[in-house]
Image (cartoon, helix red, strand yellow):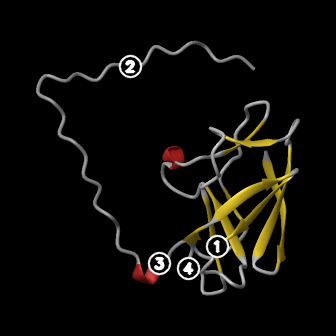
């Protein structure tokens, strides 16, 4: 599924998609939980999302007037229940807002702690098959 458009109806946001194939589904049959919702204060909260025909309806108890939705908007959303079409193709991460992702005047880089390289480790090139167009 490819995000196409959204419409706000009361306290819900209805998302429409292209390339839905024969329908929408969650990755494991459970409730979708990779959607976040925000009001105009730009503070996102995890939202409830349900499949309604060919659309997704997103809402959150704490957001009375939603204005933006983000889907799978994380470094690694793999622990979430994601959106797919019935042919098995996943929806790409998307957002409906165009707010800045961070304030460059207030940005502090995060120091990423990585595990130490084990003694004797030698990096090897990955043997990959040739790519064809």
Mark earlier in primary sequence (4, 3): 4
Label 4, label 3: how far apart the Cα atoms are = 18 Å
First reached walking from the N terminus: tag 3 or tag 2 = 3
Q: Nearer the viewer, mark 2 or mark 4?
A: 4
Residue at figure coordinates x 60%, y 87% from the top left: 41
Q: Position of residue 77 (x, y in %)?
A: 52, 49
Q: Quadrant of residue 124?
A: top left
Using the image, determine if residue 133 lies above or below residue 46.
above
Secondary structure, mark 1, is: loop
Residue occupied by mark 2 = 125
**Which residue carries the number 1 mark?**
60
Label 3: element kind: helix
The first of marks 4 and 1 along the sequence is 4
**Is 96 left or right of 112, judged from the image as shown?**
right
Q: Position of residue 96 (x, y in %)?
A: 73, 67
Residue sitting at x 87%, y 51%? 53
Instruction: Indicate the quadrant containing the C terminus: top left, top right, bottom left or bottom right.
Output: top right
Residue 104 numbered mark, or none: 3
Could you tell me if the residues under marks 2 and 1 are in contact, i.e. CB atoms within 8 Å? no
Label 3 – label 2 distance at C-alpha? 37 Å
In this rendering, the answer to whether 70 lies above or below 1 is below
* Residue highlighted by disc 4: 43
């Amino acid at each position: 599924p490819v995000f196409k458009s959204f419409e706000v109806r009361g306290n819900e946001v209805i998302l429409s998609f292209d390339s839905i194939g024969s329908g929408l589904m969650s990755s494991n049959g459970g409730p979708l939980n990779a959607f976040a919702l925000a009001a105009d204060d730009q503070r996102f909260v995890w939202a409830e999302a349900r499949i309604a025909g060919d659309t997704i309806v997103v809402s959150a108890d704490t957001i009375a007037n939603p204005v933006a939705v983000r889907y799978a908007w994380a470094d690694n959303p793999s622990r979430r229940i994601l959106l797919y079409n019935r042919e098995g193709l996943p929806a790409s991460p998307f957002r409906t807002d165009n707010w800045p992702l961070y304030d460059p005047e207030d940005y502090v880089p995060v120091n990423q702690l990585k595990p130490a390289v084990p003694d004797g480790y030698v990096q090897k090139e990955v043997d990959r098959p040739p790519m064809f167009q």
